[in-house]
Amino acid sequence: MDFKKYPMYYRGVKQVYPGISPGDSFLSKSAVTGNLIFLSSLDGRDMHTGETGSTIEEQTVTCLENVRLALEEAGSSLDNLVRNSILLKDYRHAPGMWKAIAQYFEKYSPALLEEPPVVTVTQVEALAKPECLIEMDATAVVSRDMPGWEMKKYPMMVGGKKQAYPDKKPGEPLYSESATVGNLIFLSALAGEDPDTGSIETNVFEEQWRIALDKVSAAMDRAGSSLSNVIKTLHFQTRLESLLTVSGNARQSYSPASDRLWKTELEYYDLYAPHLMDEPPGSTFLKVSSLANQYALGQTEITGVISRYMRGWEVIKYPTYLGQRGFPRHMGEIKKYYANTVKVGNMVFVSGQTPTDVFTARIESDVFEEQLTTTLGNLRRSLEETGSSLDNLVKTHILLPGTSHLSTM
């Protein structure tokens, strides 16, 4: 499996040491492993001039231009876009964003109008650069037809309507339900909308979450797989203050905000995918300010495999241990239940790592630098457990509650 990184340049300066100062961000523009291209998150700044447009339409075009040029540098093209995770500062900008995306696709990749990438859109309270309104975190392939890594997309249907052209109008969302690359399956984020009407019919979190999981199961089936082959979940929840009890103990190893999510998910697995009770997927959990549907209380973005036993793509899961023990199977007491890492062939997917001390199962420090050091230590040990190392790190998502610690990080 070939592996190569392409450097990030901003205003002519390579974003690595020694060309940058301590406190500046350092990152590669993209990393290619096998047929997959992972891009760093790209925002609405022009990479050459540093200029930022004032409107969502201008910044969306700049984002897509940055993505297109990065893919071409890696030997690919915009046609080969597989997944696009979009962060918006204000979801009211979404119609302007979607209109700009459609216009850009029409100019540079008309094929994406009919077969768009899988997409996750979420609103966040802040982006790394305060002047930016949008960021895009994209994944693509080098070639759609590379032997063993072929790419295929499956359309998203809502109420019998394909979420792509020609069924959609400018300003409306464009996305596929899933995309397969070799043995991997990537799903668009799915929430509690009724698949026939496209609307939220209940305000009960558990009912919304079961609908979302029904849609995940159906999407996995349509891609030639099953719910049992989910390997990684990225869960989003919003409106938590009104939905769940806030923790009274900031240093405990879990957040009560996730209890109802975990319980509903485990009950669903117990009924429809018992394999995941014994070998659960990896997981990352996010609290966000808003989701694409204002009535949605949660959504989930899924990565899976077609087969756990495909030669060269075999799946091995490594359990999570906190407080020197694994989590119990009993759902009545369970707080978190997920694999720490999942190895698929030569790739390792890591669950969200936190500043939790793995021996005490508590967050032992209030100092940001100490929390970050603990988090990186947990990441390093997680990779080493699979036979890998920090040297082999391809892609990170770093989540902060705000931008005040960005330079320190």
Image: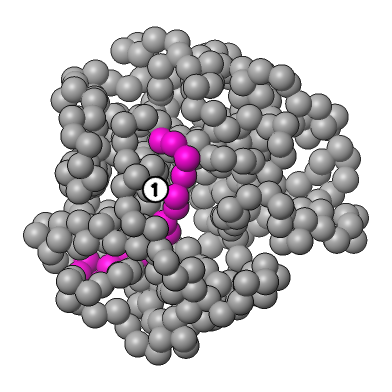
Query: Does the segment drawn in magenta span residue 257?
Result: no
Residue type, numbered disc 1: Glu
Residue in front for this viewpoint, 322 or 382: 322
> In the visual, does 117 lie left or right of 305?
right
User: Disc 1 marks which residue?
Assistant: 241
* Residue 207 is at least partly visible in this image: yes
**Residue at disc 1, secondary structure:** helix
Count how many numbered circles sit on residues in the image.
1
> In the visual, does 125 lie left or right of 367?
left
Query: Does the segment drawn in magenta span residue 280?
Result: yes
Q: Is residue 197 above or below residue 210?
A: above
Q: Position of residue 187 (x, y in %)?
A: 34, 43
Q: Position of residue 231 (x, y in %)?
A: 33, 60
Q: Position of residue 336 (x, y in %)?
A: 32, 69
> In the visual, does 223 lie left or right of 169?
left
> Considering the image in quadrants, where does the C terminus appear?
bottom right
* Residue 184 is at least partly visible in this image: no
Magenta segment, which residues?
A: 276-291
